[in-house]
Structure formats: C-alpha cells, structure tokens
Amino acid sequence: MTTPLSSMAWIMFASFIGSLGAVGLKAGAKNFKFDLKILLTNWPLMAGISGYLLSWVFFVMGVKKGELSILYPMVSLSYVWTLIWSKMFFGEQFTRAKVVALGLILVGVALLGLGGR
C-alpha cells in the first residue's frame, strides 16, 4: 500500500488545527473551573476543544487511504506549529534545544514520508 499525498495533506492540516486547539486549551485554562456555566462561557477553552475535535475529523480522513506507520508520525508536525503559536500568543521563548528538537522532528517526518513512496 502506498500513501497518497492527499492523505499526507489531511494529516498535516489535522496537526495544524490540533495545534491551534492546544492554544485554545492553554488560553482557556486561566479561567478553568469545574462549573458547567463557567465552562460553557469559556470561549477559548471551547475553541480549543473544538479544534481538537475538528483535527480528529481531518486525521480520520487522512488515515483512511494511507499507511498508519507513515501518517501517524506526521502528527508530530503539531509540535512545530505549537512552538510558533506559543511564541506568538504567550510570549514563550525559542531556545536552542527547542529549535534542534524541531529540526530533528522535521528530518524524521521527511524521512518517513520518503519511506512511504
């Protein structure tokens, strides 16, 4: 079985949306309380949960026609997006270790993608 580029694109899009979901969860965590009324009005938290659910839909569309051993590691691309969003939305710092780790993730994803061809 070969993995179509469309499956890879769905997985990459899912990782992008999922990383935005993480931003929503982090932003909503400030006002998190186990109170249903507060939870339902915590729009960043609800956006984060929605982002994760939506990313799941795209993930399912991606794995439908491809090799899981190729596609699932591509989900790690969400770490790349999350580092960018963390800097943009929360002022978190890029460190040398983070940049090296992300470089290794990208190399690994690229090698796995080539292995599926």
Image (cartoon, grey):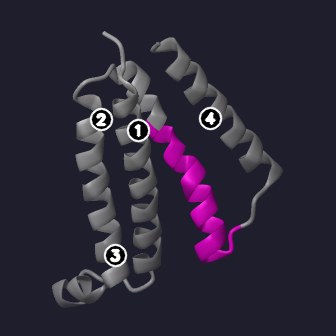
The answer to the question of whether label 1 and label 2 lie on touching residues, with beta carbons closer than 8 A, is yes
Q: Residue at x 28, y 46 (%)?
A: 58
Mark 3 → mark 1, Cα distance in angstroms:
27 Å
Q: Secondary structure at mark 3?
A: helix
Q: Which residue is mark 2?
A: 62
Q: As rendered, which of 82 and 34 lies closer to the eye?
A: 82
Q: CA distance from mark 1 to mark 2?
A: 7 Å
Outermost residue on the left side: it is 36
Q: Position of residue 18 (x, y in %)?
A: 39, 55
3 vs 4, front mark: 4
Residue that numbered label 1 is attached to: 9
Magenta: main secondary structure equals helix
Q: Nearer the viewer, mark 3 or mark 2?
A: 2
Q: Dot 1: what SS?
A: helix
For residue 20, above or below residue 46? above
Give percent across and percent down for residue 90.
61, 75
Q: CA distance from mark 3 to mark 2?
A: 26 Å
Q: Quadrant of residue 101?
A: top right
The residue mark sitting in front, 3 or 1, is 1
**Secondary structure state at the residue bearing disc 4:** helix
Residue at 75%, 59% in the rendered image = 94
Q: Tags 4 and 2 in contact by the CB under 8 Å rule? A: no
Per the image, the residue denoted by label 4 is 105
Q: Residue furthest right?
A: 96
